[in-house]
Image: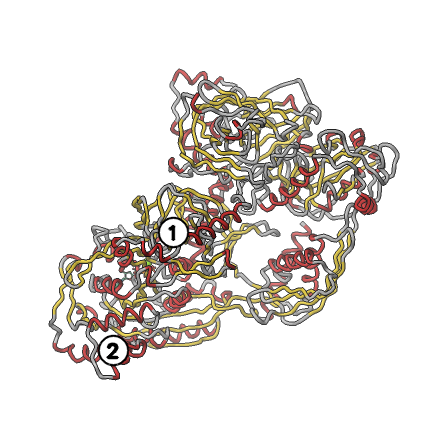
Amino acid sequence: MKGHGVVALGGLLAKRQPPASDLTRIRKRASTYEEVINNEEARGGYFATCRLGTPAQNLVLQLDTGSSDIWVPDSNAKVCTASGTEGCALGSFDPSRSSTFEVVGDNEFDINYVDGSSSKGDYFTDLFEIGGATIQNMTMGLGQQTDIAYGLVGVGYAVNEAIVGTTQSLSSVYPNLPVNMVNENLINTVAYSLWLNDLDSSSGSILFGGIDTGKYVGDLTRINILPNSQKLYTSFMVPLTSLEATSPSGSDTLTSLRFPISVVLDSGTTLSYLPNDLAAQVWKEVGAIYSPQFQLAVLPCDMANSKGHFSFGFSGPDGPRIKVFMDELVLDLMSGPAPVFRTGPYKGMTACEFGIQNFTSGPYLLGDTFLRSAYVVYDLINNQIGLAATDFNSTKTNIVPFESLSAHIPSATAAQDQSAATNKPSVTTPAYAASPGNDNDGYDTPGICGEFVEMKKQHGIGMLGPGFLSFVRMRVIRAVATLNSGRAAATRVGVRHIGLTCRVASHTQSSTSHLQQAKELAAANMSVEAAAARRTPEEIQRIARVRNIGIAAHIDSGKTTVSERVLFYTGKSKAIHEVRGRDGVGAKMDSMELERERGITIQSAATFADWKKVENGKEETYHFNLIDTPGHIDFTIEVERAMRVLDGAVMVLCAVSGVQSQTITVDRQMKRYNVPRISFVNKMDRMGANPFKAVEMINNKLKVPAAAIQIPIGSEKEFEGVVDLIEMRSIRNDGLRGINVKVSKEIPAHLKELAAEKRQELIEKLADVDDEIAEMFLDEVTPTPAQIKAAIRRATIARKFTPVLMGSALADKCVQPMLDAVCDYLPAPEDVPNMALDRSKNEEPVALIPYNSLPFVGLAFKLEENPYGQLTYMRVYQGTLKKGSYLFNTRNDKKVRIPRIVRMHSNEMEDAAEIGAGEICAVFGVECASGDTFTDGRLPYGMSSMYVPDAVMSLSIKPKRSSDADAFSKAMNRFMREDPTFRLHVDEESEETIISGMGELHLDIYVERLRREYKVDCETGKPRVAYRETISRRADFDFLLKRQSGGPGDYARVVGFIEPNEKDKEANYFESRVVGGNIPEKYLSACGKGFEEACLKGPLLGHRVIGASLIVTDGATHVTDSSDYAFNLATQMAFRKTFPDAGGVVLEPLMKTTITAPAEFQGAVLMLMNKRGNIVDTEVGSDEFTMIAECSLNAMFGFSTHLRAATQGKGEFSMEFSHYSAAPPHLQKELVANYQKELDSKRTK
Ligand SMILES: Nc1nc2c(ncn2[C@@H]2O[C@H](COP(=O)(O)OP(=O)(O)OP(=O)(O)O)[C@@H](O)[C@H]2O)c(=O)[nH]1
Ligand SMILES: [Mg+2]
């Protein structure tokens, strides 16, 4: 990513102070460095000679615009030393001979290519020289174990660069070569020119830091590089907006449905790849035919002599145009003699490969067959490309350096009105006027279909040479590469076709072997019994005293205030700071500036602490891992993932309000993940506090059997402490911040009766849920305190009961008994079942046992970026996590090293060398997604992920200053990685960036964080509702797609119907009932995909379609023209066409809205709500009332202002998504009309 480079660079530039005597030299420097690059026909790709180390060692390395780091094979690597092979003929690096060599990342260099090749070893720094430029301390990878015999120099955008863990720099990404050249004052900016000479000379040049006006003809035009869908600059992608074919007989404007086409300029790819429809026209112009054997378009080799050319236009009508003549587009098919056409009109002629091939889907590539005709300047700071026609093999030279960092490309003019680049031109079939002129020897251009069939039938091309397999392999790899956002893999095969290098997840092929290995090990000796026998008394003791707990509750009930006490009483913090306290410090667990300002928790915070508890007269130490979660519904994902990994929870309630709307939400989340809980009624000091009302509400509203195990001594302001109903004793706090707990056998006389009554209630409630107590109850035996405690523990862990405690965190009262209750009643990790899914047994559930000596299984449940890099929170379910060990990510089977383990204390951390089974920690330097399972490679286990709610609200966003684009995309990327409920997409039609999330506050917080943490001010649009679309009745379709536009056509017929999916109104369903193979299996899956794709953008509003079924019952194929593409498209078109007949409906989200306000405002609030939705429930308390209503989200925009006005600012409300429901017809009509208007205006623009 460019952002990284710029950050690192800014810092370094600012720090650098050249000695005064150097200043003149620096001012006079050439500022450019040129290196001649060669196209190695045998290997493919462009190669540059570089020098490494002191004294310098020469190595020839592949130049790659698709990556950004340098790595070299180690002379001791097996590939270089193995006898009987070519070894590392292009050179290898011997670190022992370099006096400046230094290892900076032990074992951390690890690259895997999609074709299965890889390179691993240390990161090191050393002197590096290219084109006469010397970089003193270049960070590079040393391929100690590699199967690739030559290294690489990346000069592209830094994407997924490996992390040098020990540096702990802000970005953890080291500067790449061009950035380093700037840092070392060698060149002025992060940019270079790269031009290739013509096909025969197989060479070219890279000129760092400048342009050579002698190497091109005409104007050098600047156009903008396109960012990817996440607004990141990752490749040299530009909009191709026109293509013309010209020959002596005339010229044609070729058209494509896909214009403007995003194409990646890629010097690492030999051929160029265009969309099917456009490629077919190009082929027709030159008479190229598609060979199924080679899976390539081929043509007679003598077409190289044709006078025709293609003209590629970029960035709209005023953008640059590059002519590519036929001699650059005809390439040898294979090394050795060329194959010969056996049949058809080209019979007897030699066959060559055509330089323009087809691709079914993007990203499309313009490789060397295009680039040889273009002089290209790559400007990675301004994200621009300079384009001009190359002056092939010119001997003139006139080098002009870039003037300064971020100066524009010298001598280049910006293309006019690049916004025109997004216009869609009309699509017509060309007249092929240029085609006869390309017909070199007077033979007819063959009908492509006819030739295709004939060749297939008769194996038209003879002589399948040794190159054949390589081609097949290349096609496969290319197909994979398209899945990897355009970064095709280096093929490393013996032909000159080579793609971009790609650091994809990892070896897919290795997953089976890991599975196999894991199975064997599991069978061998990893039985739970064996591991149990290996447990030491210390381990048994440790695990029994671990409590992983979360604090969850309705907003503002005092979770963070309680957590603050926990930290203080456990000795973890030395002082208590209140949420919004007068000291202005803010609570430890609310570490974000925004949290402190607003007094709400936004992100959950984790900490660990030891609690010393007296048991049987002895002090026992319990180890707590505690997560304080936010209460606001917009941050509900934080509660969700805490509940996913914690063993128990403390549910906090407000003594005045009891169960509130979010209490119900967290109750649902606790139930979803089977989390046992104790309840703590907080705010006992408040007026109107009534803990028994809370107990009743837990029983009745949450349907969780509950009983108080304490009663309050004094109330409201006079609240002093509690009576412990189990031991029948009183507990009060004493000393500074209630640090001492005073226990007395003395129960205040006026409370004796109430205590006895409530104790009886407790026993009765327990009798309902616990057999042992039930029996005693029937036998009229009073259980002992120990028996009561044991029963509470059993019932709580079995989730049949919750004991209710009470206190006031703010007043420092009765928090310690709650901590004792956590130890007494919440489970240790081994008391609750934790399951994984065995991938070797069809995902059968298996129990994870928290024993240290079992194979490791852990779950990454939360990611966070902090100044030291990516922090991954991990729950260790089984086995031990050790620093420096290697783990496998089950999702992609990627092996990762764990360079650093920490225990989190809110935003601080403590290093740990090892974490035992059952605990929670965080690790650095691990690239993964939230919810990934890690194992040590010995068990084939994965774990189910967590529930991620859908976004309901979105808004458009744009940085105010265009110079902030980098920081903006960096921030967005981070937010999305950290928070799965926050999403971003670019609207295809409006080209706006849209963020979506859980509500106004959620989105607001991110906009604010952009401003504060990234200094990016943004303009945002009005919040919009995330509508959905669905259908209301069955409608049949019989759809035929038949297109013939030159080249293989498109043919697909699909017959079937769509209807509402009654089984699941929020999911779509696809089924095939095709009999007799009328549509073959492989096309059916394309139909399924087509349906899926069509559902992403509904026909009415462009919002997602839900609750629809599509059933295919019949269809037809065509021998040559049917394809996945055709069936995918036909299904999409059929669905869209049939949608209105099936009664398409717009759905809007209905929100459960809870309003609480002083009783006097009930009338006013009622009036407000009547206008907005249905009132479901109203509850009137002594001085306030709570109203629950179901409202459409649409009606709720700006509600907070209205509520404030109606209640003198005293009313509060919260909103939570409930379900989707059909929008009223007038709204639907208006929305559809607006959408159509928007579309029309785009079309006519
Ligand atoms: N009277 C009284 N106020 C309390 C008590 N505990 C917390 N508060 C106040 O309630 C407000 C909210 O407290 P927090 O601890 O931030 O509540 P929270 O549950 O963490 O809130 P979110 O994380 O935003 O959901 C603060 O103003 C606290 O001072 C208590 O025991 N008594
Ligand atoms: Mg909080």
Amino acid at circle 2: Ile
Q: Crowdedness of circle 2 by 10 Å Cα count: few (<14), some, many (20+)? A: many
| Proximity of marks 1 and 2: CB atoms separated by less than 8 Å | no
Q: Position of residue 465 (x, y in %)?
A: 73, 35
Residue 379 in which image quadrant: top right
**Residue position marked by numbered label 1 in the rendering:** 874
| Numbered tag placed on residue 918 in the rendering | none
- Which residue is depicted at the point 17% across and 58% down? 619
Q: Position of residue 232 (x, y in %)?
A: 53, 43
Q: Is residue 162 left or right of residue 1074?
A: left
**Residue position marked by numbered label 2 in the rendering:** 763
Residue 1205 in which image quadrant: bottom left
Judge whether 731 appears above or below 51 on screen: below
Q: Looking at the image, which is closer to me, 720 or 961? A: 720
Rendered-image quarter of ligand 1: bottom left
Q: Is residue 472 at all visible to an observer of this figure?
A: yes
Q: Is residue 1234 at all visible to an observer of this figure?
A: no
Amino acid at circle 1: Met
Asked whether mark 1 lies closer than 8 Å to ligand 2, one says no
Q: Position of residue 272 (x, y in %)?
A: 68, 37
Residue at disc 1, secondary structure: strand
Q: Looking at the image, which is closer to me, 596 or 701? A: 701
Q: Is residue 17 left or right of residue 284?
A: left
Of marks 1 and 2, which one's residue comes earlier in the chain?
A: 2
Q: Is residue 321 left or right of residue 10?
A: right
